[in-house]
Amino acid sequence: MILSEFSQGEYENRCERAWKFMREQGMDALLLTGDVNRRYFTGHRTQFGVSYSRPMFSVLPYGKHPFALVSESEGYTAKDVCWIKDIRTWFGFADDALPVLADILKELKLDRSRVGVDYGSEMRLGMPVPSFKTLQTLVPNVEFVDGSEVIWATRMLKSKAEIEYIRRACTANENGFRQGWRVAQPGMTERELHCHLSIAMLEGGADRVLFLPINSGEGNYFKVAMEPTERKLLEGDTIWCDAGVTVRGYWSDYNRVAAVGRASEDQKSAYRNVWNITRACIEAVKPGIPLSAISDIAKNAFKGPGRIGHGSGLDITEPPSIRSEDETIIEPGMILHVEPRVVLPFGCFQVEEVIAVTENGYEFLSTPAPQEIPVTGEI
C-alpha cells in the first residue's frame, strides 16, 4: 500500500459499515464492477477504466476483507495502491476474466450465495450485459441482486479525510472562477475562457478538470450542459459556468455566474433573488430533518417542482437528492450541493454551494458566492 489515499483503518471501517447493511439485506457478498465502487472499498485506482476490453472486479464477502481481480498488466499498480493483500490477476481479453472470477467465487464458497451487484439506482454495471449473463451461467446457483442500496448507504456519510479532499477540490474550483472572471472580456471566445478556467483550476490544486460546461448569450442560457463554443462574449452577456474538478477522485462540482463588462438591473435582481433563495435553503440544513423540507423552500419560492441539489463524493452526483419526494433524513457527514436555478432570456442564474453537514448544522466547502452578481474584469 505504497500510494494509498487513506489509512487501512478507514478502509476497514467502510467494510464494517457495508457488512452491517449487507446483514440487514441478507447479502453474502458484494460484487463491485464499477471503477468508483472498487476504488472506494479497495483503494484501487487506475486509468485503465477508460477501456472496456479488460474488465476488473472486486468482491466484498460478508465479514471478510475484499479481494481484487485485475488484468495481468494492472496487477503491479494494484499492489502499490490497494490496502488489501488478496489481489488476483487474469490474462487475456474481455470475457476471459469471467471463468477466473467464477472459480474464485467457488473457492470462497460463494457459488451458492446471495450477491449484491452495483447495477441499481444511480449506478451502471461495469461490464457488458451479455458478459454479466455469461457470468450467471458460470455460477448458476448464485442469486445476483441489486446492491446499490447497501453501497449508497455506506458511501453517503463521508469521513473527515474524504471531506478534506472535497474541500481541496472546491478550493481549486474557486481559483478557476476567480482567475477566469478576471480575464474574461468582450471578444474572448467561450473556448478561450474554458482554457483559462481549466489552467487556473489545475494550478489551484485540481488533479483533473473533468466537467466544465459554459453558456453565454441570448438564446443559449437553457443549454446547461453545453460544451464551450467559438462564440465570442459580448458586453452585457451573462456567463454561466459549472465546474467539476477532482482531488484524489473526489469531486467539487459547483457553478458560478458573471456579467460581461456590465450588469443590467434585471441581471442584478435575478441573481440576488436566486442567491437569497439558495442561502435560505442552506440555512435550513441541520441533522434530523428530511431533505424534502429543504426542497420545499425553493419549491415555494419558484412555484414549481424540481430537484434542487444532490450529494457527491467519488461521483459528481450521488444520493441523496434534494427534492420534495426524498424523505432521507439529514445526517452529519453528508455532502450536499444546493443549487436552485432560474433561467431567463437574459441569463441562467444559479449559485450552487457545496456544504458538509455537521453535528449542529453545516459548513461551507465551496467559497460562498458574492451576494451581488460579479462583473468580469472587476474581480
Image (cartoon, helix red, strand yellow):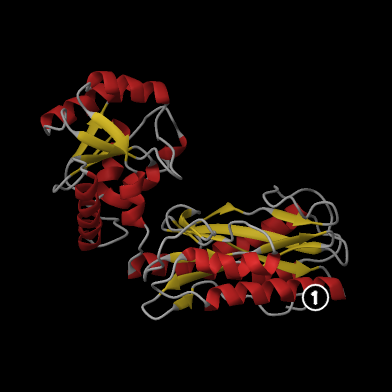
Q: Which residue is drawn at 80% across and 48% down?
A: 230
The secondary structure type at the circle numbered 1 is helix
Local crowd at mark 1 within 10 Å, few (<14), some, or many (≥20)?
Answer: some
Q: Quadrant of the C terminus?
A: bottom right
Q: Where residue 58 sits in the image (x, y, percent)?
A: 27, 40
Q: In this view, does 42 lie to the left or right of 343?
A: left
Q: Which residue is drawn at 36% across and 45% down?
A: 148
Q: Where residue 237 sits in the image (x, y, percent)?
A: 84, 63
Nearer-the-camera pick, 118 or 180:
118
Q: In this view, does 310 lie to the left or right of 100?
A: right
The answer to whether any part of residue 36 appears in the image is: yes
Above-or-below relation of 361 to 222 = below
Q: Quadrant of the N terminus?
A: bottom left
Q: Where residue 241 sits in the image (x, y, percent)?
A: 68, 60
The answer to whether any part of residue 1 appears in the image is: no
Nearer-the-camera pick, 266 or 329:
329
Q: Residue at x 43, y 42 (%)?
A: 123
Q: Where residue 117 sits in the image (x, y, percent)?
A: 32, 37
Q: Quadrant of residue 254?
A: bottom right
Nearer-the-camera pick, 137 or 296:
296
Above-or-below relation of 138 to 254 = above
Q: In which quarter of the image is residue 267?
A: bottom right
Nearer-the-camera pick, 314 or 173:
314
Three-letter code for the amino acid on which mark 1 is drawn:
Lys
Q: Mark 1 points at which residue?
A: 268
Q: In this view, does 219 lie to the left or right of 121?
A: right
